[in-house]
C-alpha cells in the first residue's frame, strides 16, 4: 500500500485493484483481463513517479521506517557472520556493528551503521548515530582486516555522528578525523555502500573507500536538508529547497564524481523487496571486489589517494 | 540598503570615529585603545581574550620577516552546484568575500621560516565565508601538504573555521577526506604535522585535519568542537556550561597537547620542531 504523499496518484489504483481482487475471489470470471491491465498501469505509473522523485521525496524514501537495516542485509546476503565488539578504549557502540562475514565465497570484514526497526532496537542502537567509540571500533576492525588480508565492506546508514555531550567529551571530531586519515593507509580494498542516509562526517567516517556505491533512493549529504534550511534559509520549512540545492541524490553524486556506481533498488523503495535489494548489492559489491583485488597494495593506495585528491571543483 | 545611500545618524558617525580609536573586547566588553589591542596581537589587554586575526597578520607574527613565499594564491572557488539559497547565489557571496578580504579563498598557503626552521604553512582566515572548507580550500591545503612531502618539510596548519562549506554540498564533505589523505602521506614519510586550532575550529574542520596533528595546539578560549552547541542542547535537552567546547575543555579531555598564548606560539612551534631529528 502507498505510504508517501507523492504516491497518492497510485493509491486510488491500488484500492481499485484490491476491490477487483475481492470480487474475483467470489466470482471467477471476466475480471482477470481488467485486473491485469490495471496492475500493469499501476506498475507503469509507480515507475514514472519513482523515476521523477524530487530530492526531498528521495530523503523520505531513504528514511522510511521499514527500509532494510544492516542486520537485514546480513540476513539476506552474508553468511558466517562473526560479530566483534568494542573499541578497546571505552565501550561497545551498538550504532556501529562489525565483524568477519562471507559474501558469496568472499571472506570480508563487514562494518556498518546499525539502525533499529522499532523503538526498543533504536534506543539500543541510538538510531544509528555512532559515538567516538563506534568510529574507533570501526578503525580497529579495519586494521584487523588489513592484518588478516581481507577486504573491508562498509554499509553507511546514519543521520550523522551523534551530537551529544558525551560524544564531544570523548572526541567525536578526533575519532572521525582519525578514521579519515587512517583509512587512506589501509592496505586492503575498501568498498562502501550507502544504503539509506549518508549523514555528513558521520557517514564519511567509514566511507573513505576505493569504490563508493549508493542505492538508487539513498541520499548522501554534507548536512541534513533541515539543518541547511535552518542556517541558510533561517527556516526549516525550506528543507525541500535545501535538498534540491545540496544535490544529495545518487544520480547527482554520480555526476559529481563522488560515487562510482548506483545500485538499483525496486520501484517503491528497498522496503518493498529487501531480498532483491540485498541481491543487487551483493552482485555489485562482488564485481567491485573482483576488480579491486587485482591491484597490489601500493597501486590500491595510490589510486585511493588520487581518487580523493581529484574531488572538488574550483578555479585555478 | 547600499552604504552610499544610507545617511549616517549622529550616533553612527560617532561610533565610526570611536571604532578608529577604540576596540571593544567581545569577551569582557572593555574598551581598549585600538593601538594597544593591535600591539598586543589582537589579544584583549584587560582579560586576555584572543580576538580573530587575518591570515596575513598570522603569517606576519609566525614567520621570520621576509621569508614567506605564497603557494597557489590564485586558486579560488567555483560554483559546482549552481547553489542558490534564501539570500541569493553562492557566487555573490564569494564575490563579496573576495572584495571584503582581498583573498581568493579561506586559506593562505606557502613556505617560510620559523626561527630559521623551514616549514610549509597553511593559515585559514575566518573572514572569508566563516573560514569554511570548500573545494578550493581543500585543494590548497592538500597541495601544501604535497609540497611538504616533496620537499621534506614540516607542515603547520592554523585552523579558523565553522566547518564544511554547505554551498558546495557533498564536494565540501569530500574535502575532509582529501585533506586527511594528504596528512596521511606526511605521516607515512615521517614528516611532522602541527595543528594549531584557533577560534573557532568546529564541524568538518575539527573532524578532519585539525584534530590529527602530531601535536595539537590551541589558543586560549577558542571554540573547539564537533557539533554545534544548540544542536547538542536540543539533543540532550539540557543547558551546557560556558566552558563547554573551549580549548581548555578539549585539553582537559585529552585531545590537545597544550593551550598556548598567541605571543608564545612562534617560539612554541620552533621549540617543538627543534626536536625533529631526521
Image (cartoon, rainbow, N blue to C red):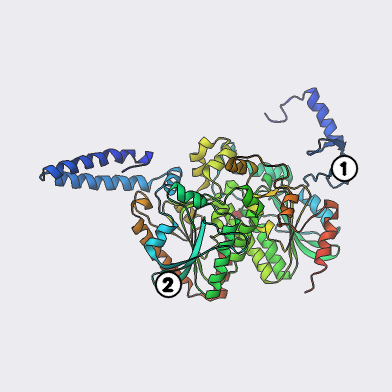
Residues A223 and A133: in front is A133
User: Residue drawn 15% across and 45% down?
Assistant: A25
Q: Quadrant of the C terminus of chain B?
A: bottom right
The circle drawn on residue B45 is: 1
Q: Are marks 2 and 1 in contact (CB under 8 Å)?
A: no
- Relative to B79, B224 lies left or right: right
- Relative to B244, A239 lies left or right: left
Chain to which the residue tagged by mark 2 belongs: A
Q: Position of residue A242 (x, y in %)?
A: 52, 42
Q: Secondary structure at mark 1?
A: loop
Chain to which the residue tagged by mark 1 belongs: B
Q: Position of residue A17 (x, y in %)?
A: 22, 42
Rendering quarter of residue B231: top right
The answer to whether dots 2 and 1 both sit on one chain is no
Residue B255 visible in the picture: yes
Residues B101 and A64: in front is A64
- The crowding category of the residue bearing disc 2, from other C-alpha atoms within 10 Å (few below 14, some 14 to 19, many at least 20), is some
Q: Which residue is mark 2?
A: A106
Quick check: A296 above or below A176?
A: below
Amino acid at each position: 500500500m502507498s505510504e508517501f504523499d507523492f504516491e497518492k496518484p497510485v493509491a486510488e489504483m491500488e484500492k481499485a485493484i484490491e476491490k477487483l481482487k475481492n470480487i474475483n475471489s467470489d466470482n471467477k470470471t471476466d475480471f482477470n483481463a481488467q485486473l491485469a491491465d490495471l496492475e500493469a498501469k499501476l506498475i507503469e505509473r509507480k515507475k514514472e513517479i519513482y523515476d521523477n522523485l524530487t530530492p526531498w521525496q528521495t530523503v523520505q524514501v531513504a528514511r522510511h521506517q521499514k527500509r532494510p537495516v544492516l542486520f537485514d542485509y546480513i540476513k539476506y546476503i552474508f553468511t558466517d557472520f562473526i560479530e566483534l565488539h568494542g573499541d578497546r578504549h571505552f565501550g561497545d557502540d551498538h550504532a556501529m556493528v562489525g565483524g568477519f562475514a562471507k559474501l558469496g565465497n568472499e571472506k570480508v570484514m563487514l562494518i556498518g551503521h546499525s539502525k533499529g526497526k522499532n523503538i526498543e532496537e533504536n534506543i539500543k542502537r541510538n538510531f544509528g548515530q555512532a559515538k567516538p567509540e563506534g568510529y574507533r571500533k570501526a578503525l580497529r576492525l579495519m586494521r584487523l582486516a588489513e592484518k588478516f588480508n581481507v577486504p573491508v565492506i562498509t554499509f553507511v546508514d546514519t543521520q550523522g555522528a551523534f551530537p551529544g555531550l558525551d560524544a564531544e567529551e570523548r572526541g567525536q571530531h578526533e575519532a572521525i578525523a582519525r578514521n579519515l586519515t587512517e583509512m587512506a593507509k589501509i592496505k586492503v580494498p575498501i568498498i562502501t555502500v550507502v544504503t539509506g542516509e549518508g549523514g555528513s562526517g558521520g557517514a564519511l567516517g567509514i566511507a573513505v573507500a576505493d569504490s563508493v556505491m549508493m542505492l538508487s533512493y539513498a541520499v548522501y549529504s554534507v548536512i541534513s536538508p533541515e539543518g541547511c534550511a535552518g542556517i541558510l534559509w533561517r527556516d526549516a520549512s525550506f528543507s525541500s529547497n535545501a535538498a534540491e540545492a545540496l544535490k544529495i541524490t545518487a544520480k547527482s553524486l554520480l555526476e559529481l564524481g563522488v560515487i562510482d556506481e548506483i545500485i538499483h533498488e525496486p520501484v517503491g523503495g528497498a522496503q518493498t523487496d529487501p531480498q532483491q535489494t540485498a541481491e543487487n548489492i551483493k552482485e555489485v559489491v562482488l564485481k567491485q571486489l573482483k576488480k579491486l583485488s587485482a591491484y597490489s597494495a601500493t597501486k590500491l593506495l595510490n589510486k585511493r589517494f588520487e581518487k580523493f585528491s581529484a574531488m572538488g571543483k574550483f578555479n585555478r | 540598503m547600499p552604504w552610499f545611500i544610507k545617511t549616517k545618524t549622529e550616533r553612527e558617525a560617532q561610533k565610526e570615529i570611536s571604532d578608529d580609536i577604540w576596540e571593544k573586547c567581545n569577551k569582557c566588553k572593555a574598551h581598549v585603545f585600538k593601538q594597544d589591542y593591535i600591539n598586543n596581537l589582537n589579544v584583549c589587554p584587560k582579560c586576555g581574550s584572543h580576538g580573530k586575526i587575518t591570515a596575513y597578520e598570522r603569517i606576519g607574527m609566525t614567520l621570520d620577516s621576509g621569508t614567506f613565499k605564497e603557494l597557489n594564491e590564485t586558486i579560488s572557488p567555483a560554483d559546482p552546484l549552481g547553489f542558490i539559497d534564501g539570500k541569493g547565489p553562492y557566487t555573490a557571496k564569494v564575490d563579496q568575500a573576495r572584495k571584503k578580504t582581498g583573498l581568493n579563498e579561506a586559506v593562505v598557503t606557502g613556505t617560510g621560516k620559523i626561527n630559521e626552521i623551514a616549514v610549509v604553512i597553511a593559515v585559514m582566515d575566518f573572514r572569508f565565508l566563516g573560514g569554511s572548507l570548500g573545494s578550493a580550500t581543500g585543494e590548497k591545503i592538500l597541495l601544501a601538504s604535497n609540497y611538504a612531502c616533496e620537499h621534506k618539510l614540516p607542515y603547520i596548519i592554523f585552523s579558523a573555521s565553522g566547518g564544511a562549506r554547505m554551498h558546495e554540498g557533498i564536494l565540501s564533505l569530500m574535502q575532509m577526506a582529501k585533506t586527511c589523505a594528504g596528512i596521511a602521506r606526511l605521516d607515512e614519510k615521517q614528516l611532522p604535522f602541527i595543528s594549531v586550532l584557533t577560534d573557532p575550529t568546529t564541524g568538518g574542520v575539527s573532524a578532519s585535519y585539525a584534530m590529527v596533528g602530531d601535536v595539537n595546539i590551541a589558543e586560549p578560549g577558542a571554540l573547539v568542537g564537533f557539533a554545534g552547541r544548540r544542536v547538542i542542547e536540543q539533543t540532550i535537552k539540557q543547558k551546557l556550561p560556558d566552558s563547554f567546547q573551549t580549548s581548555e575543555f578539549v585539553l582537559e579531555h585529552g585531545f590537545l597537547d597544550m593551550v598556548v598564548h598567541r605571543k608564545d606560539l612562534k617560539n612554541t612551534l620552533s621549540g617543538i620542531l627543534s626536536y625533529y631529528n631526521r
